[in-house]
Image: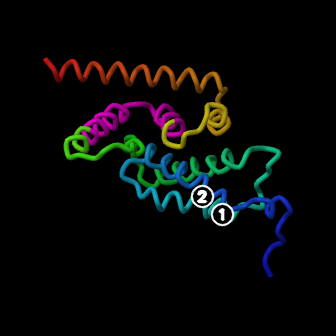
Amino acid sequence: MGAAVTQEESELDWDALYADQAPRVYNYFRFRLAGADVEDLTSRTFEKAWRSRARYRRDLAGFSTWLFKIAHNVALDHLQRLRSHLPIDAAAEVATERTPERDAERDSDLARLAHLTASLPDRERELIALKYGAELNNRMIARLIGLSESNVGTILHRTVQSLRARWQADEARSHE
């Protein structure tokens, strides 16, 4: 006989939560772990969430915060198994008219972004993945990482400014 379902568990609409959160979790892994099987990591995250659903406490954290803490731990487990640091993967798909020229330009830009972000410290790569891959706000990121919300904002701002400066410097060198 299975474990009793708590009232809080029964209030969660897992189908709706999955439909809402799966793309965000998927994009988090795409940004954080280049070359990884992001579909498998996304599945593992939801499997772990399902298995530990009885431990979820709404009074301590929102569902997406709890879920991204699980995703963060799945990513750390994956990195430990690889024993290497991987660069940021491609950014989310942008809806545009597709042409071979635009595809080539986009691929070139994504490769350049991956190269620039590969040299970032782990913490900054993690924050970029959570912000732009998972589309989490600074408050949720702060809860996940254990930093203050203002610290998250400051680090993200400085990291993006640094990436922009390096991007422009690369462009200037390529036009010389």
Percent x, y of residue 145: 62, 36
In this rendering, is residue 84 above or below 176?
A: below
Q: What's the residue at 27%, 42% (across, down)?
A: 107
Residue stretch in magenta: 106-131
Q: Quadrant of residue 108?
A: top left
Q: Quadrant of residue 112?
A: top left
Hey, what amino acid is under mark 1? Asp
Looking at the image, residue 141 sits to the left or right of residue 175; the answer is right
The quadrant of the image that shows the N terminus is bottom right
Q: What's the residue at 33%, 31% (across, down)?
A: 116
**Observer-nearest residue: 10 or 42?**
10
Question: In terms of secondary structure, where does tag 2 sit?
Answer: helix
Q: What's the residue at 44%, 31% (across, down)?
A: 121
Residue hosting label 1: 15
Residue hosting label 2: 19
Measure the C-alpha gap from mark 2 to mark 1.
6 Å
Hey, what amino acid is under mark 2? Ala
